[in-house]
Image (tube, helix red, strand yellow):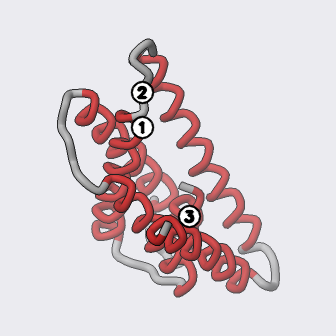
């Protein structure tokens, strides 16, 4: 989610209007749908693999400074957010109040997206902004690879 927030800023800075609004909203909405699907009994295999691939992919997008059209970006973000939401839905305690649980993970996820955006905005104000984004993306990509092999 940090990487998605950072990538939204990268897109906005390259002229993609409303990226810093639509990208996080797309992520949160799709994540909520994924959680609802799981709680409703829909089972999708390889959820953890999907999450690891998303961490790796969004990291690589930052490393390369890759900017995609907004419609492609939103589709990609929503697709991978479904996996994140499914994981949250699967981990919901049976004793949890559903509304409170959902509100909690959505709020925490929104905070992570905002933190990623803030970090990217701060990084773009330095002389080494390109390196900071690439270095951060490299850390995310390596984390995703680690998740895939472990």
Q: CA distance from mark 1 to mark 3?
A: 19 Å
The residue identified by callout 3 is 3
- Near mark 3 (Cα within 10 A), the count class, few <14, some 14-19 or many ≥20, is many
Q: Seen in the image, is 134 located left or right of residue 93?
A: right
Discs 2, 1 touching: Cβ within 8 Å: yes
Residue at horizontal 56 percent and vertical 59 percent from the top: 5
Q: Quadrant of residue 13?
A: bottom right
Q: Seen in the image, is 126 located left or right of residue 54?
A: right
> Which comes sooner in the sequence, label 1 or label 3?
3
Residue at horizontal 60 percent and vertical 75 percent from the top: 137
Residue at horizontal 42 percent and vertical 43 percent from the top: 28
- Near mark 2 (Cα within 10 A), the count class, few <14, some 14-19 or many ≥20, is some
Q: Quadrant of residue 148?
A: bottom left
Q: Quadrant of residue 48?
A: bottom left
Q: Which mark is residue 88?
A: 1
Q: CA distance from mark 2 to mark 3?
A: 24 Å
The residue identified by callout 2 is 92
**Mark 2 or 3, closer to the camera:** 2
């Amino acid at each position: 989610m940090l990487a998605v927030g950072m990538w939204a800023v990268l897109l906005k800075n390259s002229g993609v209007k409303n990226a810093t609004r639509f990208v996080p909203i797309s992520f949160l909405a799709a994540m909520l749908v994924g959680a609802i699907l799981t709680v409703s009994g829909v089972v999708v295999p390889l959820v953890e693999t999907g999450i690891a691939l998303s961490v790796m992919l969004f990291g690589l997008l930052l490393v390369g400074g890759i900017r995609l059209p907004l419609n492609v970006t939103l589709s990609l973000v929503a697709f991978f957010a479904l996996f994140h939401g499914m994981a949250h839905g699967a981990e919901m305690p049976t004793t949890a109040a559903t509304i409170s649980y959902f509100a909690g993970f959505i709020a925490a996820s929104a905070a992570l997206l905002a933190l990623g955006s803030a970090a990217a905005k701060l990084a773009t104000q330095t002389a080494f902004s390109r390196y900071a984004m690439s270095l951060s993306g490299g850390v995310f990509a390596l984390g995703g690879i680690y998740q895939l092999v472990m």
